[in-house]
Amino acid sequence: MADQGVEGVTADGNLPASVVMKLAAGVFMVSSLLVVSAELLAPGSASRFATVVTGAGALVSGVVIWVLPWGRWPRALTLWLVPFTFAIIGFDYRLAAGNGFIYAITFLMIFAWLGLAQPRGMSLKFAPLLVVAYIVPLLAGPVGRSDLGLASAVYVIPCCVMVGEAVAWGLALLARSESTLAETRALNANVFEQAPMGIGLSSMEGVLIRVNRAYADILGYRPEDLEGMSQGEVAHPDDREENAAHIQSVICGDADSYSLETRCLHADGHVLWLSVGASCIRDRSGEPIYMIGQIEDVTERRALREQLAHAAVHDQLTGLPNRSMFMERLNLMLVRAERGGRQVALMFLDLDRFKLINDGLGHDAGDRLLLRVAGRLEGALRPGDLLARFGGDEFTALCEVETEAEALEVAERLKAPLDQPLAESNHEQFVSLSIGIALSGRGGMSATSLLRNADVAMYRAKDVGPARVAIYREDDELPRLHTLKTSNELHRALERQEFELHYQPVVDLRDLGLVGMEALVRWQHPVRGLLAPGEFISLAEECGLIVPLGTWVMREACRQAAVWAAERAKELQDNGRLNISINVSAQQLADPQFPDLVAGAIEDSGFWADHVWLEITEGAILSDPVAVVGVLGRIRELGVHFSIDDFGTGYSSLSYLKQLPVETLKIDRSFVDQVDQDPDDMAIVRAVIALGDSLGLSVIAEGIERPGQAAQLTSLGCHLAQGFLYGRPISPAAIGLFPGDDLAEWMGSADLTSA
Ligand code: C2E
Ligand code: MG
Ligand code: MG
């Protein structure tokens, strides 16, 4: 049936034609039976034969109507039955001895049938025909035999129409609600089926009742195969208990739902990681009746996550733990060993002459060698010990030991496998290890100190020859070789951007306001921690690295100054510019590119050249005064200012001082230190201030730590100062976005007791 929306009722709200016609057939048969029995039972009936014939005719009609294939024909055809039925009823009435009850009831039945079979309004359309069909037999009937007066038409006819309409209306209502229900069901079924995520419904015992296609696909089954299976059958045996505990917690009402990542077995047997979210469906009384769960295959995502997590803490080349994992384990082991009364031995293992191999045979050969060395070292480890690659050709080992002798034993074990040469394709490669050991002692020690000690010990081992083992002693000094190592590290530090700038305020002693800041470089050394310039500047000068380092300092300081200036301009509504002082070494000044570097750094940063102060030392001027005068002149043309740093410690030639475009002298800390106590220092400071006055130079006092020094300097006429009293050099992160005029940013750093 094309127009059938829901089983039983058509889309327009009526019963299908075949069903209705069967009802009509029933009406025929029942009415014929009633007519015949009424006639036969009526005393003195005259026309029994005719009645039986008519009844039989109606019966036969009923049977015919019953069997005809109404469903295939247009429904309008069924309407022809109505006048036909009216005629039969009229005829029946005549024969049924005028039984009014049967007469009226059959009309009602016809209209009920009309309501069932036809849309609303059809009963109304048939009303005129009904009037005729009802009244004509009454008029034509034998007077006195009729129990039914004409007046009954007034009740029966509207009743018939109302019944017909009411039935049609009721059916339409039913159809509408059924179709809404069906639509909702279809939608739900669609959502369930089409959801990209696996969804499954199971009993509280864990038996799968219904699963969607995605659910089945994830597990490699057909949906019908899974239905009826227990969830336990697909869960990984090791995870079943945990899953059951979660389900139990939901059943008990401890949780409304749960989610977890768990393992399942695919139909072909391989293990899957699923992300599962499940909750419980309860009946009205709150009793749990079903579990509904959604699953997602996260096997790949998880593998990737594990891969990333592994890569984050492992060295790519050797697969050994890397520096960060090593540090984490070191800290853990230190705590554990301290609790257990044992000590931690940290060993630095450095391949001897690795640089020669790497440079001579190439990086690939170097990598291969490292890989094989790592393999051999790993094989020599005791259970529980840890080997890591710290970087380059440096490995570290970590073990818990009772005694120093035990640590030495471990070191020998690690060295032993390298006694055998490593076979390369066409030659044999001999390699050896130098090992430095540091012991934490039973009292415990910080990880950084332990690392530093092992580092020092390793350089002592290297110092005495290849393939040596050395244990750190308290009186160990950093060996000379360390310098070599540091120069390599300096190169790497530049590449890895391990340098940072800290800033110290320059203040006006009269109002303690911020005048500018001096940029002071620091090296965030991976092992030794934050290093002051004293530990690496002269080395950087020695190995020619001061120029790239100084260039970086220049660019970074200008960039930072521009950022601060922008923030201050917003807040203070003036140009917000602070002076930025940058230290410059002699080699930088000697570089013919230097003026261009300065100009480039300032231009790229967007900062103002006339707020940049370059600090040069007297030594730098003396190295080649004529050239320096030229270079400084070119830079001064940019607007940049110069000051002479550590003034008084060198041998400044006053004549050059006059020729140089210098505007400020910074009195060295060594004179300021006792300026309030030592008359000689006071005399020197007074002389420098006088010199400055006569040459038209301003003077900044460095290294003020006590209010007494400040008071003395002010009384001597020096108004600009720098020192821990006003603020230590601190990082831009500590200073923040906006260095205010009141030095609040440096407050904490000025506390000398925390130095
Ligand atoms: P400097 O330019 O004379 O910088 C002042 C030094 O004195 C800084 O040491 C600073 O921390 C320290 N200082 C400041 N106030 C006080 C104080 O009240 N008491 C004491 N005891 N010290 C104070 P730092 O940062 O260690 O720098 C040392 C030197 O390294 C600098 O001396 C400078 O000559 C050089 N330097 C720093 N950064 C650079 C740079 O980027 N390039 C070059 N070429 N040299 C730099
Ligand atoms: Mg300086
Ligand atoms: Mg200085």
Image (spheres, rainbow, N blue to C red):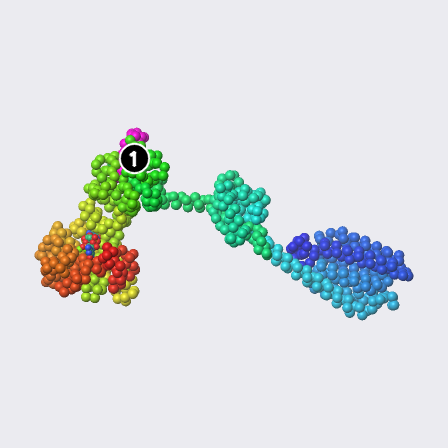
Is residue 628 in the magenta section?
no
Mark 1 nearby-residue class (10 Å; few <14, some 14–19, many ≥20): few
Magenta residues?
Answer: 420-436
Q: x and y percent of residue 41 in the render?
A: 87, 59
The vertical placement of 88 against 374, above or below, is below
* Residue underneath mark 1: 409
Q: Is mark 1 within 8 Å of ligand 1?
A: no
Q: x and y percent of residue 306 in the render?
A: 41, 44
How many numbered circles does the render carry? 1
- Name which residue lies at 43% across and 44% down: 303
Task: Say whether residue 415 is visible.
Answer: no
Q: x and y percent of residue 428 in the render?
A: 29, 30
As helix, strand or loop, the secondary structure at mark 1 comes to helix
- Name which residue lies at 59% across and 56% down: 285
Task: Say whether residue 574 is visible.
Answer: yes
Is residue 428 in the magenta section?
yes
The vertical placement of 694 against 355, above or below, is below
Q: Is residue 272 left or right of residue 392?
A: right
Among the 4 quarters of the image, the one containing residue 554: bottom left
- Name which residue lies at 32% across and 41% down: 342
Among the 4 quarters of the image, the one containing residue 431: top left
The vertical placement of 559 against 470, above or below, is below
- Name which residue lies at 58% across and 47% down: 209
Report the amino acid beneath label 1: Glu
Q: In this view, does 412 lie to the left or right of 160?
A: left
Q: x and y percent of residue 269 in the render?
A: 51, 39
| Residue in the foreground of this view, choosing between 241 and 664 | 241
Among the 4 quarters of the image, the one containing residue 682: bottom left
Ligand 3 found in image quarter: bottom left
Q: In which quarter of the image is the C terminus?
A: bottom left
Residue farthest along the front direction in this orientation: 341
